Amino acid sequence: MDLILPIVLNVINSAAILFLITAGLFIIYGLMGIVNLAHGEFIMLGAFVAVVVGQSNLNPWLAIIIAPVILAILCFFIEKILIRHLYGKIMESILATWGLGILIRQITEWYFGKGYQPVNAPMTITVDFFGITYPLYRLLIIALAIIIVIALIVIERKTSLGTTVRAVIANESLASTLGININKVYTVTFVVGGAFAGLAGAIIAPLVTVYPSMGLNYIITSFLAVLVGGVGSVGLAGSTGLFGTLDSTLSFFFDPILGSISIVILSIFIMRYKKVQI
Amino acid sequence: MNGLVKDLVVNKPMLRDFIIISLLLAIAPFFSSDYYITVISSAIIYAIFAISFDLAWGYMGILTLGHSLFLGLGAYTYSIMQIEFGSKTLAIIVAILIPSFIGFLVSQFLFFKKTTPFFIGIVTLALTVIAEQGVLKFSTWTGGQNGLTGFETIPLAGTSFYFFLLVVLVIVFAIVYYLTKSDFGKLIVSIRDNEERVQFLGFKVPHIKTLVFVISASIAGFAGILFANFNGFVSTNLLAFSLATQVIIWVAIGGRGRIVGAIIGALLINILTPIFNTNFPYLWQMLLGLFFILVVLFIPNGIYSLMKKSMQSTTGFVTKVKDEPLKNTNSNDALKMENVSVSFGDLHILKELNLVVKPGEIQCIVGPNGAGKSTLINAITGRNPASKGKVTFNSTRLDNLSPQDIVSNKVARTFQTTSIINDITVAENLQLAAYKGKIPTVLKKTKDVVLPAITLDLLKKVNLAHKLDEVAENLSHGEQQALELCMVMALEPTILLLDEPTAGLTQTERKDIGKMFKELAHEKNVGLVIIEHDMDFVKEIADRVTVLYDGRIAADGSVREITESTLVKEIYLGTAVEGV
Amino acid sequence: MPGLEIKNLTAGYGKTMVLRNLSINVEKGEIICVLGRNGVGKSTLLKSIMGVVPVSEGQITYQAEDLTNKPSHMIAQKGLAYAAQEAAIFPELTVEQNLIVGSKSIDKSILDDVYEIFPILSQRLRQKAGTLSGGEKKMLLMARSMIRNSNLLILDEITEGVQPSIIDRIQQALTLLKTKGTSVLLVEQNVDFALKVADKYALMNNGEIIEFDSVENAVKEKIESNLAI
């Protein structure tokens, strides 16, 4: 038990982190059909908020509150200036958001340099968890992921906001003729998706290496998780759970490369046999 | 000589511009320091890489976010092979084969089922990242973080290497240029423009995409070999996603779908970057990124497309009559739909439908909206596969075949929303159809359009015979419909399915088309299935009328029987009920 | 207060103009029925009003406000309730959710009447709308259009594929709406039903209105022969 539990917790932790990272992407892609390849950079910006907060000697918890707000404001303008032009155009949205990601990376590199930036965790205490000691921070992350999954499912199924969103996903034209302002829904979606990404970035900053190009590590797995999981909170929880588990297990027992390869191969096979167009 | 130059200047702008660029490159070393010769040498190799990417993306429409995978593979394979086995020639050969092979493997996953550009982009990006991780892991072979040196390179350096590269560029350009200008080249851009229509002309689209992708991968691999030889050093920079990103930017800014544009983009940016990098590195990269976004939004075809007003369309096409067999050799076998059901999840469109289509007969399908008429054609032609039941023709089962294979079984169709290739001319559209799905020549651009006599007649009647060089997009709606009709007739099908062919046509045009349909059916023994709303037209030409209602055949008989049927009246007046 | 006024409307998809220079008015409290064969442009007319199909020439005004080519949600918020011919409900949402999704306010006073005319809906409120039969879905559409405080209903073949008993209920609903002064513009293939509920009828052919009169002057057989094969 003592040997297995830390491993299991680490695996769950990886899955939870993957879920948090993917949630923002999923909200944007699932609802708007927009491929936001700058998603990794939004996460990176959230992480850099944590860097700045740390450098300013402020309370590290502040980062977790400020990051989503900053990203929300940023995404509001990005949506109005750029994303608006991309609705319905897959190829253009891939290119334009890819370019946006490059731009954000460059600006960040220019200001902070290319190197790794250290970030202190808001808490370093460990607790007694079923007989082993485990960092409380990581346990909180797991708890947060679970809370968010439940919250998303509840919102999706039980609130009128969720109904509106599901209506827009199902049939945009019909939703519009029933009085739903699609553009407003899109703006809000992009802002919320970006805020989620910022939040995720600030949360994982103490646990990973933070540098301007870090976003790339996340978008591949996140996108594949979204493609495989489909549109729906349950699907997303499922795919991120699967991928997070697979990646961390294989990386731990064998090699990180095996983890990455297996995710890609698994995605390809699942997508080939799913009947949905990807 | 004068005529040749004039022809070049006026009719072949890309060739002309490339010659100008090559001349500029040829004299550049005499005005540059050694450092700049190195810079331009690199830029030339990058231009070759850009050509490979433009072939896949600009021409074929396949956007890979990790094209550097192939370049890196070429570079590493060459160096490792050379170190292990000594022979440079062997190393070069294998280093071209490996990226080609990987390109082939990747194609199997990307082109043979319906995939979005999104999936293709992410998977290729992931492969590049994995390859990079692989290189770092197997560092005993690859040199890992430090890169790989110590392999033998081509015995050239400095200015001589530069001119070697220039020659290679000219050769690669020539190959790709003539490829894209040939009939095969037209096929490629047609797939990019309207893949579905090309599929329904009988072309094996996934295989063609694979072919082009493999060619692109091998050229990229070759560029990698050039880098290895040029630098004497290979590192993960050549595999990295940053290079994959860069090539997208060069081609997007320079000119997508125009090789010269891709070359200009790659040369310009890679010559300017070292200059700016010494002075304001980050500003330059940011400006590039910003410019890239603007180009994507506002100048989607790149700067080169601004310089040329439009792609020169090939002109000078001539139609020719096809030698036809004395008597239609088609059998009299009917096409049969047996208990065919088509559903989308819980939505049942066709419900255990039985239908017989006989060659030599004109069968009109009528029925209220939502009855499933288009879906019926889709089920026969493979666009919406049947979830139950089967479709047979000439003792071949059609329901499990791809659309292109169904076309080779001589079953063709038109679409309710006219489907033609907008970017090319009328003649080129017809020529494509006349190929009947065979792969066109890569060697030249043929100017003959060989069509059956009946198609040429129609072409004249709808006044398209003198508009051969008109770009299809500029035709009127009725003309586009007529063009599509001519195209499917060029396939010489035994069964022809038409979805509302008279929509948007004038009275006279309807008369002419009606006459032609009768000729096709009664003289050429073609079986016609026509979905129609124009009842006067139906009464005029139909041998049989089938009424479709709520996914089932409600009535089937002669024009008279159907007009007199009370059930049919009820269906049309909305008083019939579901389930009848 | 003027009602719906459509002047010289030319509209269609891409290059094909389906409607040509069409004009029609729906006054307050009127029920007008549009008849015609398949493909003449009836649905396109309704879709142009709702902003789903682009208008290239002409004008659509409602209560003196210009609605031409405005976003659909704005048009809906002005009080136009639309029931399309195909796929007009959200199959994965419940009946209840389908009734209220997108609406800013519900007319509570009419809710009781609606449940009285369509009792089966009140029984199936929690069910997914996709499980309803075709006739029940049409009832859902009717109910949805009624409860949204709308003063103009736009209905596209609301009786299509529906059994006579349900058609009666829909007729009841329309009568109720008339007493409340709601206007209705409906497209119909069922001439019997159309002439029973409407005040005026408009016969369309080739994108234009070829006959427009009060239903008292309608000759049923003549109209039916125009529609059928």
Image (cartoon, coloured by chain):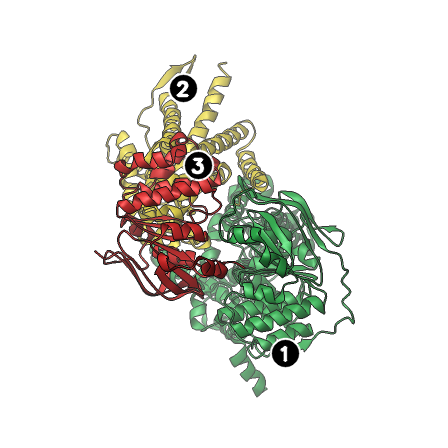
Figure chain in green: B
Residue A136 position within the rendered picture, expressed as x and y whole percent measured from the top left: 36, 21
Q: Which residue is label 2 attached to?
A: A134
Check if mark 3 and mark 2 are on a common chain: no
- The answer to whether residue A46 shows anywhere in this view is yes
What residue is shown at x 46% (from left), y 50% (from top)?
B242
Q: CA distance from mark 3 to mark 2?
A: 48 Å
Chain at tag 2: A
Check if mark 1 and mark 2 are on a common chain: no
Question: Do the residues under discs 1 and 3 have CB atoms within 8 angstroms?
Answer: no
Q: Within 10 Å of the Cα at label 1, are there few (<14), some (14-19), or many (20+) other Cα atoms?
A: some
What amino acid type should be assigned to the residue bearing mark 2? Tyr
Q: On the rendered structure, is B577 left or right of B440?
A: left
Q: Within 10 Å of the Cα at label 2, are there few (<14), some (14-19), or many (20+) other Cα atoms?
A: some
The quarter of the rendered structure image containing the N terminus of chain B is bottom right
Say which of marks 3 and 2 sits in front: 3
Figure chain in red: C
Colour chosen for chain A: yellow
Q: On the rendered structure, is C106 left or right of B217?
A: left
